[in-house]
Amino acid sequence: MKKSLMVIGVGLLAFTVSLIGSYFAMPYIAPDIVAQSQPPDSVASDSLDQRAKLMALIDSLNSGDPKALFAQQTTVNQLRDSLTTVHDSLSSVQSRTSTLQAQLDELQQRVSSLEATQAKAADISNTLTDLDLREMRAVLAPLNLSVYESLYAQTSGRNRTRLLQAIPPDKAARLVDRIVARQ
């Protein structure tokens, strides 16, 4: 019985020594496994830095140091003011954006209206050039100068001459003046 206890004791002692030996030898045997089991130094140092800053803040608040509290209040006020400035700038940009969007919508409507007017003028111009000169005079006589100008812009060279011949002479002269003034 003594002998069996002695064998068990020697076995436990050998196991303990081998366990401690492998603990100390592990970084040399498998360094990558040991590195994975330890937290990175940067995380530990970041945590320590943040903890130190937090502790310093708590200490300054607990100490009741008026200068530290005043400095912190000043910093908070500056941050609040800068945040207010950024908020005001953002509001200004948003209102300007909505104004520009409204102007863009208006311009798009005007362009589509002008395109529709040009298409109508082109159709009417093609129809008018099929008429003889006397019929054209009867159709064109009551129109205003801006309509003449649109029709003139949509016709070709030979048909422009016919259009000018069909317009009353005083209106034709004003139309030519307007066209020359634009060029």
Image (cartoon, rainbow, N blue to C red):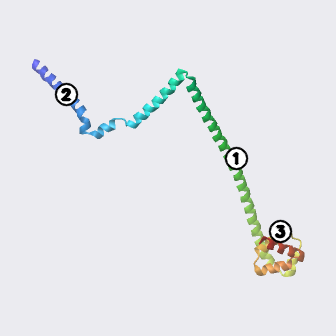
Q: CB under 8 Å between callouts 3 and 2? A: no
Seen from the viewer's position, the closer of residues 46 and 140 is: 46
Q: Is residue 126 above or below residue 93?
A: below
Q: Nearer the viewer, mark 1 or mark 3?
A: 1
Quarter holding the N terminus?
Answer: top left
Rendered residue at 29%/38% (across/down): 33
Q: Residues within 10 Å of mark 2 (few under 14, many from 20)?
A: few
Q: Quadrant of residue 172?
A: bottom right
Residue named by callout 1:
95
Q: CB under 8 Å between callouts 1 and 3? A: no
User: How far is disc 3 from disc 2 in space, using C-alphas?
Assistant: 109 Å
Query: In this orientation, does residue 130 appear?
Result: no
Q: Which kind of residue does numbered mark 1 sit on?
A: Ser
Name the secondary structure under disc 1: helix
Q: Is residue 143 left or right of residue 75?
A: right
Residue named by callout 2:
17
Farthest residue to the top: give it: 2
User: How far is disc 1 from disc 2 in space, using C-alphas?
Assistant: 78 Å
Name the secondary structure under disc 2: helix
Q: Which kind of residue does numbered mark 3 sit on?
A: Ser
Residue named by callout 3:
146
Q: Which kind of residue does numbered mark 2 sit on?
A: Val
Quarter holding the C terminus?
Answer: bottom right
- Which x, y percent locates residue 181? 80, 71
Name the secondary structure under disc 3: helix
